Image (tube, rainbow, N blue to C red):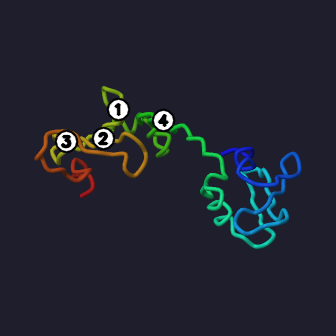
Amino acid sequence: MTFSDILARLANVRGSGDQRTARCPAHDDHNNSLSVAQGDKGIVLKCFAGCSVEAICSAVGIEVKDLFPPREAKPARKRREPKPLTLADLAIAKKLPPEWLAQQGVADFPDGSGVAIGYFLEDGSQHARLRKRASLGKDGWSWTGPAGVPVVPYGLWRLREWR
């Protein structure tokens, strides 16, 4: 509802510009006791006899929300899909040489969707499942490989060396 629409519903409107006075429709007003102004965020109503904004709006057949322009719908923010993690990104984040990570069984996934972290058994053979890191966040990892195959601890192939 516009400023002009509100003024059209009032009696004895006086003044000019964004500031007007009128008879308050919420009480038996014989003098202009209602101030009507166009504010930065909407239309401001003030009855100097003490009527509430709700009572004034009800008396002219509108709701308080009609004093404010409808909010423009904000365009939906496009979520940028994070760039998949690469071996080079992981090396920088962990401050490790990429060559060393590659020696530990870390490689870029062939489809470019993240980094594969190889898990090896005690005899050095590749375990059937890989850990995939798509991002550095705490939720940025998953397991790949055949379902039903249990995961194993990382570093089993190093046990002989550590013993």
Tell me the residue at 67%/53% (across/down): 67
> Is tag 1's residue or tag 2's residue first in the polypeptide sequence?
1
Determine the residue located farthest toward the bottom in the rendered image: 50
Determine the residue located farthest toward the left in the rendered image: 148
Q: Which residue is mark 4?
A: 80
> Is tag 4's residue or tag 1's residue first in the polypeptide sequence?
4
Of discs 4 and 3, which sits in the foreground? 4
Disc 1/disc 2 C-alpha distance (Å)? 9 Å
Q: Which residue is mark 2?
A: 132
Of 110 and 122, the residue lying toward us? 110
> Is tag 3's residue or tag 1's residue first in the polypeptide sequence?
1
Q: Secondary structure at mark 2?
A: strand
Disc 2/disc 4 C-alpha distance (Å)? 21 Å
The C terminus lies in quadrant? bottom left
* As drawn, 27 above or below 62: below
Of 108 and 154, the residue lying toward us? 108
Q: Secondary structure at mark 3?
A: strand
The amino acid beneath tag 4 is: Arg
Q: Looking at the image, do the residues carrying marks 3 and 2 touch, with CB atoms under 8 Å apart?
A: no
Q: Which residue is mark 3?
A: 129
Q: Secondary structure at mark 4?
A: loop
Q: Position of residue 83 (x, y in %)?
A: 45, 34
Q: Which residue is mark 1?
A: 113
Disc 3/disc 2 C-alpha distance (Å)? 9 Å
The amino acid beneath tag 3 is: Arg
The amino acid beneath tag 1 is: Ser
The amino acid beneath tag 2 is: Lys
